[in-house]
Image (tube, rainbow, N blue to C red):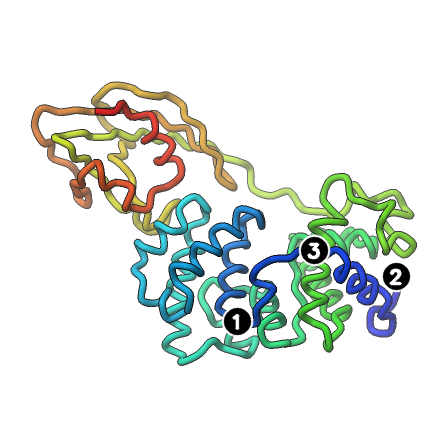
């Protein structure tokens, strides 16, 4: 392996590649930390193409951090609908109010890390791109590029691996070009050194790539086995009474915190017409199987605490889980 502290060829090759092949993304044409931060939060668990659309919508509706801070959590969750991992939206809103309370967007790594929902990777991305801070990003693309190029088989999701890759990434970072280098290595992993079918024959790093020479490209990076996927069974009942329906906001400690849903029955009697059985919805570590019923009582029923009656025509104003959106599409029109 080369010594990253004395050999600058790796970074130089990536920067040359980036100048010719880097992606043109709207948040790269600005040094506005708010716009960069917003893009990084959206892209944490989202493909660039999908996230791009949400970033533009957020920037149009809330062009400054002050505007976002003045929004309600419901408004932010509603705009976020369809992206999943809704804790990101709640953290985004909370952090916007943190920034306003600070008086300006923090410009140090410590200050950026203090924002809710911002970890080491996001802080490094914001710090380098908005403030030229010499902090290296380490995400899935970076793990893949470094593990293949240097032939590192330490599991990337182990404590040892995270430390090893973070140290290597920082050692390789050219401090005078931190922003360009961070974007270069991320784009290189997304476009060139892809998870499947990487473009090794056209790679500017092929001569020094350990994985290519040892025929281990398909084996790297190494990742430890994670949690077993679990199944969960839900029963939703859409109560329809005189043009209204009953919904409630999900609480803390479970999926979809802060979003709204129809009547959920976990134990007890199920009333109504079965509209669909076994609707399948996949989350990160679980698969949801849901039965969906329509109940049209003759009198307004008593419901558990926390449920509110809303006009059916207004239900789109509430932030709903994607699964519930799919279920509502099954409802017969009245």
Which of label 1 and label 2 is nearer to you? 1
Residue 25 in picture, x, y percent from top left:
60, 57
Element type at mark 1:
loop
Q: Quadrant of the C terminus?
A: top left
Which residue is painted at 72% across and 76% down in the image?
175
Residue at the spot of label 3: 187
Which residue is painted at 57% across and 60% down in the image?
26
Badge 3: few (under 14), some or many (20 or more) residues near its Cα, within 10 Å? Answer: many
Which residue is painted at 44% across and 65% down in the image?
116
Mark 1 vs mark 2, CA separation in Å: 38 Å
User: Along the polypeptide, which appears first: circle 3 or circle 2?
Assistant: 2
44 left or right of 235 in image: right
Residue at the spot of label 2: 1
183 left or right of 117 in image: right
Residue 221 in picture, x, y percent from top left:
74, 48
Badge 1: few (under 14), some or many (20 or more) residues near its Cα, within 10 Å? Answer: some
User: Along the polypeptide, which appears first: circle 1 or circle 2?
Assistant: 2
Vertical placement of 4 versus 230: above or below? Answer: below
**Closer-to-camera residue (333/305):** 333
Q: Quadrant of the N terminus?
A: bottom right
Element type at mark 2:
loop
120 left or right of 61 in image: right
**Closer-to-camera residue (26/322):** 26
Mark 3 vs mark 2, CA separation in Å: 23 Å
Residue that lies at the very extreme toward the left in this rendered image: 299
Which of label 1 and label 3 is nearer to you? 1
Element type at mark 3:
helix
User: Along the polypeptide, which appears first: circle 1 or circle 3?
Assistant: 1
Badge 2: few (under 14), some or many (20 or more) residues near its Cα, within 10 Å? Answer: few
Residue at the spot of label 1: 32
Which residue is painted at 60% across and 43% down in the image?
226
């Amino acid at each position: 392996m080369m010594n990253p502290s004395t050999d600058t060829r790796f970074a130089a090759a990536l920067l040359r590649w980036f100048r010719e092949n880097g992606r043109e993304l709207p948040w790269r044409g600005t040094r506005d930390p708010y716009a960069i931060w917003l893009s990084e939060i959206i892209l944490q668990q989202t493909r660039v193409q999908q996230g791009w659309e949400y970033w533009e919508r957020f920037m149009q509706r809330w062009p400054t951090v002050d505007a976002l801070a003045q929004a309600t959590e419901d408004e932010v969750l509603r705009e976020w609908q369809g992206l999943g991992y809704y804790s990101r939206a709640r953290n985004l809103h909370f952090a916007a109010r943190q920034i306003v309370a600070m008086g300006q967007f923090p410009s140090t790594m410590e200050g950026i890390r203090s924002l809710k929902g911002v970890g080491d990777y996001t802080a490094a991305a914001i710090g380098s791109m908005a403030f030229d801070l010499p902090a290296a990003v380490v995400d899935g693309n970076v793990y893949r590029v470094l593990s293949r190029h240097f032939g590192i088989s330490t599991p990337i999701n182990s404590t040892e691996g995270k430390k090893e890759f973070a140290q290597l990434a920082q050692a390789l970072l050219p401090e005078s070009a931190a922003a360009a280098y961070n974007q270069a290595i991320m784009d290189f992993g997304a476009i060139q050194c892809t998870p499947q079918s990487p473009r090794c024959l056209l790679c500017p790093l092929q001569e020094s790539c350990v994985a290519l020479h040892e025929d281990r490209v398909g084996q790297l990076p190494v990742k430890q086995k994670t949690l077993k996927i679990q199944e969960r069974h839900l029963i939703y009942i859409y109560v329809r009474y005189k043009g209204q329906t009953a919904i409630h906001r999900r609480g803390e400690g479970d999926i979809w915190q802060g979003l709204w849903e129809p009547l959920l029955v976990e134990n007890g009697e199920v009333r109504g017409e079965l509209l669909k059985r076994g609707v399948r919805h996949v989350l990160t570590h679980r698969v949801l199987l849901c039965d969906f019923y329509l109940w049209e009582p003759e009198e307004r029923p008593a419901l558990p605490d926390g449920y509110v009656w809303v006009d059916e025509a207004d239900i789109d104003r509430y932030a709903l889980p994607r699964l519930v959106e799919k279920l509502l599409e099954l409802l017969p029109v009245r």
